[in-house]
Image: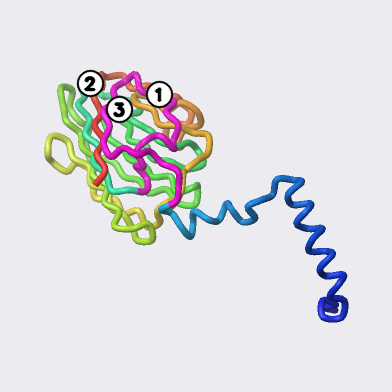
Amino acid sequence: MNNLAAQEPERLEEMKELFLAEAEKNLAFPIGGGLWINTYPEDRLGSPYSSWLFDESTTRMPEFTAPGLGRESNLVTIDVDLEDNASGVLYALGGSGGGVSLFMENGILKYEYNMLLLDRYKDESDSPIPAGHHTITVDTTIEDLYSPGEVVIRVDGSEVVPPITIETIVIGAFSASETFDVGTDLGAPVSLDYADLAPFEFDGTINKVEVNLY
């Protein structure tokens, strides 16, 4: 490579000015802006709230207005009535390119953290959850965005899914276009487990979903 910058400083300045003019004309500023959130995650766009109350009517809530279930410590509490061999999505945030989903299949309670397709942190209950009224909690602890997170899932106060370690946290958003849904997973499905059944509507009754960040 022959570096002519020192030999032709005037031409170098002309090229710099041309670059800036073309960048402005093509709306390329801020250059490298897409990398900003990786360095300064506190500047990401998000909701000003720290607690929410949802029900089955909550669908297609844009991710930037929804709870940061994948990147902040949070407790999700679901008041639900289950049928025998309950199936369907309890809640989902994101889409096939990345997201979080809690769902049931033939009574088995399942959780998946889709880390932008690079990893899928998932586990499930050892046995079906019986029909009836239950309280399901998903407690996600994320100390910081550069350390592993841990998810503990309980039904009526008892752990039913082995603790799940999320080795890599998604710092920004899972998607620019996907959403938060209760009782279904509209759009592209978070989990491949129910991709063929999407939107995989829940067949029980979700009375309420409480989300609290901490």
Q: Residues within 10 Å of mark 2 (few under 14, many from 20)?
A: few
Q: Which residue is mark 1?
A: 59
Q: Does residue 198 sit above or below 7 in this rendering?
A: above
Q: Which residue is mark 3?
A: 106
Which of the two labelled residues, at mark 2 and mark 3, occupies the earlier sequence position? 3
Q: Does residue 136 sit above or below 204 in this rendering?
A: below
Which disc number belongs to residue 38?
Answer: none
Q: Residue at x 40, y 56 (%)?
A: 168
Residue 144 visible within the image: yes
Q: State how far apart marks 2 and 3 are (Cα).
A: 20 Å
Q: Does residue 30 appear to the left or right of 208 in the view shown?
A: right
Q: Which residue is mark 2?
A: 207
Q: Which-is-in-front pick, marks 1 and 3?
A: 1
Numbered disc 2: secondary structure: strand
User: Where does residue 85 sit, x and y in percent of width and height?
Assistant: 26, 24
Q: Does residue 77 sit above or below 8 in this rendering?
A: above
